[in-house]
Image: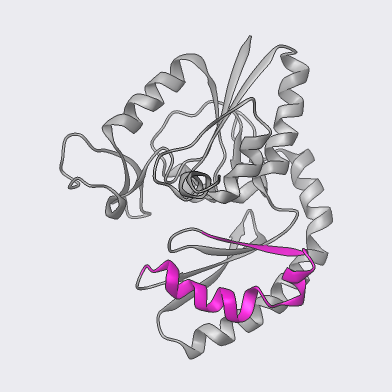
Amino acid sequence: MQSYIFLDLDDTLFQTLRKCTLAADDPRLQARAYLPDGTPNSFATHKQQWLWHWLAKGFKIVPVTGRDVYAFDRVNLPFQEEVVLNHGAVILDKQRNVDMIWMERMQQALPAYYEKLREVWVEVEAYCRRHHGFKTRIVIDFDISWYGVIKHTDGSENTLLTVLNNIIKQHPFVCDGSLYWHLNGNNLAVLPKIINKESAVGYLMDGYKQQHPDLLTFGAGDSKSDAPFMALCDYALIPKNTQLFQTLAFVE
């Protein structure tokens, strides 16, 4: 039986130092990802290091991440399978070439949704200019504009809730489901509904099933946005005290 794990990265396999309980020079931490200037900015705990080694022994590991190709290239782990980037917008093959079947599918569907995103983004940027500390950007990867991200200099999810509640949630294109939002920590994203990890993982899983009729799949993630792709898998792995864990812990 062939086993695959579809694995979220940030806050699942490593996290920023702010979320660690140890100092950066503690030997129990290991740098896993870096800033563009080469400075380590994400670290794996001793348990996360053990988890990686355990998974690498028995699973084909498919990263499923919100990172773009440049941020993924700064992750110091030896991935060998396909890669899902940009919350599902882009898939790379084992040779790190773009999966053109998936890319063409996305490019054909994206323009109508992107026009709606731009309309929302005009209002988001206007709000953020009126309030100090917000940082907004449209994520561009492979020369394509995919979705929008908002952060705040105070690192507070509560601060991001103001723009979410006042602008994004109320917009007609969000209300009708054309766009959706995702908030986790200091990261608020607004995405076209066609961009999601679930669809990308389902596409890859269909291909794997053709290669391996007897297939065992695991999904691992920390965020509520990871839950749909994890639900496609036979088993789910959720780190303790993460957004998804806390959400499920209160379900009766």
Q: How is the image coloured?
A: one colour
Q: Observer-nearest residue: 159 or 192?
A: 159
What percent of the width, then of the height, locates residue 102? 76, 42
**In percent of the image, x 79 and y 39: which residue is there?**
101
Residue 65: say if magenta. no
34 shown above or below 180: above
Q: Is residue 225 left or right of residue 77?
A: right
Q: Is residue 181 above or below residue 159?
A: above
Q: Image height check: is 139 above or below 204?
A: below
Q: Which residues are magenta?
A: 155-183
Relative image position of residue 106 (x, y in whole percent): 77, 51
Visible in this render: residue 199?
Answer: yes
In magenta segment, residue 156: yes
State the residue in front, 152 or 161. 161
Identify the residue shown where x is 49% and y is 29%: 79
Does residue 97 appear in the picture of this structure?
no
Q: Is residue 148 above or below residue 129?
A: above
Q: Residue furthest bottom?
A: 130
Q: Which image quadrant: the N terminus?
A: top right
Q: Position of residue 182 (x, y in %)?
A: 58, 60
- Residue at the far top: name it: 1
Please state if 231 lies on the left or on the right of 37 as rendered.
right
> Which image quadrant for residue 167?
bottom right
**Which residue sits at x=58%, y=44%?**
226
* Residue sitting farthest toward the front: 252
Q: x, y (%) of residue 57?
A: 44, 15
Left or right: residue 78 versus residue 106 is left
Total labels drawn: 0
- At 70% from the left and 40% from the top, the residue drawn is 200
Q: Residue 125 sits in which quadrant?
A: bottom right
